[in-house]
Image: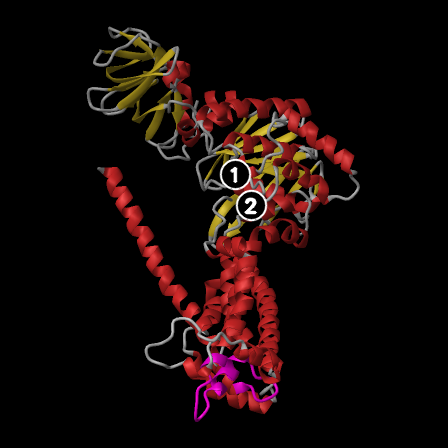
Amino acid sequence: MSTSRTNGFKWAGRALLVVYTLFVAFPIYWTLNTAFKPLSQIGTFPPTVYPKGFQLDAFVWVLSNSRAIDAILNSLIIATGTTILSVILGALAGYAFSRFSWVDPGGHVSFWLLSTRMFPPVAVVLPIFFIYGRLGLQDTLFGLMLLYLTFNLPLTTWLMRDFFDKIPTSFEEAAFVDGYSRFQTFRKVIFPLVRPGLVATMMLAWVFAWNEFLFAWIITGNSTSTYTTIIPTLIESNQIQWNRIMAMAAVVATPPTLILIAFRDNIIEGMTLGMTDI
Amino acid sequence: MAKVEIDNLTKRYGSIIATNDISLDIEDGNLTVLVGPSGCGKTTTLRSVAGLETPTDGTISFDGVDITDRPPQERDISMVFQDLALYPHMTGRENVAFPLRAEKGYSEQEIEEAVQDAAEVTDCAGFIDKKITDLSGGQQQRVALARALVRRPEVFLMDEPFSDLDELLKRQLRAEVVQLQQEFGVTMIHVTHDQEEAMTMGDDLVVMNNGNVVQFGNPDQVFSRPQTLFVAMFIGSPQINRFDCDLSWDGDAAVLDSGELVFELSGDAAEPLRAATETTLAVCIRPQRLTWADTDPEDGFSVPVTVNVVEKIGTEDIVRCTTPEGQDVTAEVNSGALREGMEGYLVFDPNDVHLFDGVGEEATRLN
């Protein structure tokens, strides 16, 4: 009887997963479905479930329109730059918080760092707009990188600190006793052990910067607009270019997807703090 | 190989005193065991020798050279940690080679040979190429020993490395470590909370409590002449029997009255009691020094008891008894001699009694 019950659970679980998969996959399907349709087929009722008269026009527009391409490149530069900065700084800060208690007695500094994520970002949009105006950082790639760094750093610091905390201090002490300096110990013992966590952290930081809309919309102008700010401009006064919007969405979803596939093992290990075999 | 001298070592963490003005001379080539309950300061002492803790006060020297301010990298030591600290991203072989790679100047072939040597003496050649996570607890232990031995350090430190192993493996590894230590003649400092491990392994024991060294000596001295009541209670298994007695004098004879039992000492045996400063004293007797008698004998001291539990440990039985008023007394007697429920007397020689000036941990030995 117990086996039939176990089987029942197993099948119910699978059914749930199928439903969930459909739920998750549907928007992707609909994005592609819409992107390949001519504009006239969008918004019809009943909707067409596959593109009649398969068209690549929307994709051609995304990949040949200089405004769209520049925006995607800007997003790439900003996301990558801010990720590199926030992961390097976050890893160093996380290591310090994890290993040197005198750095932050009582944990006030690390808490204050985290607290910057406790208010909605929209609360600081206006002050930042004026500050950036005064400092000449509006509409610059660096300005946006710096801004995303502010939001990413607490995340990367806290995540990295957690990964470092998972490594017993005796690992380092054993290396010291064996003659390794702190830096050599970090390189040979600590770094290889936190690498999965580092990759997962990079991924999170990158995706945040890649997808960010609100600040990009406020801070950037013509010369540095990111792809997220291009999409709303496709909503024109007399029509909405759904197929271009969807084509753009499909294109910009590709890099994170590829990264995710490439580092799948590391990311899963990192996200689950999967260092249980230490 | 080096002689390790610890002079007036004090380590404070805020208001907590981990080690209180400790001085020790650890002889070249000896295996010295620091033993005590958790929080007694034994690990702090070891970590200070390793350079992983900076003493608040005091000095540590190897062969007369003051190394107190040197970082661990510049002390010729190796250490086996409680959690072993084997690196999970490396194989056993890479772990063992790791200390050699810290110093430039070893060729690959020299490293290879040293690793092979260390693996053979610690009996881990068969699995040294496996990943650490694929090794059993005992195998990891051997790899950790090999890693510590590979460099032939001056001082070899062990921080309770056997505490997570099962009993059989523990005994086996203890014996092997002692053998290796003797073979290499290395100075070894071993930390444990397990008094049995300390007794079986150590050339010298350092019994610690509350940050102080309470006794330093070889296992025989510590077992047969404990200097404080704490040592008497801590060392020895089964635990020593203790009777708290009020001292009074009847002419030249000292009368020790526990309220239930009365022991009378006269002549030379009573002499040490004249130095007593307390009125209530601890009278202790090792379970191994008790013998059974069916009737109350005329010679020696005796305690009337009922046998409650008989624990078999091989050729001996540990017999847990109680006196009519409920005081527990433990004896170790030949196997099969006693059964549960038997009534009789546990008899001992007054010369085997340990007398302490008071009933607190710090009470000092009188006889």
Q: Residue at x 46, y 74 (%)?
A: A116
Q: Residue at x 35, y 56 (%)?
A: A17
Could you tell me the amino acid type at mark 1?
Gln
In the rendered structure, the answer to whether residue A189 lies left or right of residue A15 reads right
Chain ID at mark 1: B
Q: Give the x, y percent position of residue B223.
A: 47, 22
Image-quadrant location for residue B304: top left
Secondary structure of the residue carrying numbered label 2: helix
The residue tagged 1 is B82
Was residue B52 drawn as part of the magenta stretch in this picture? no
Label 1, label 2: how far apart the Cα atoms are: 9 Å
Front residue (pair A36, A262): A36
CB-based contact (under 8 Å), mark 1 and mark 2: yes
Q: Residue at x 43, y 89 (%)?
A: A239
Q: Residue B251: in sight, yes or no?
A: no
Answer above or below: position of B224 versus B145.
Answer: above
Q: Give the x, y percent position of residue B48.
A: 59, 44
Q: Which residues are magenta?
A: A219-244
Secondary structure of the residue carrying numbered label 1: loop
The residue tagged 2 is A170
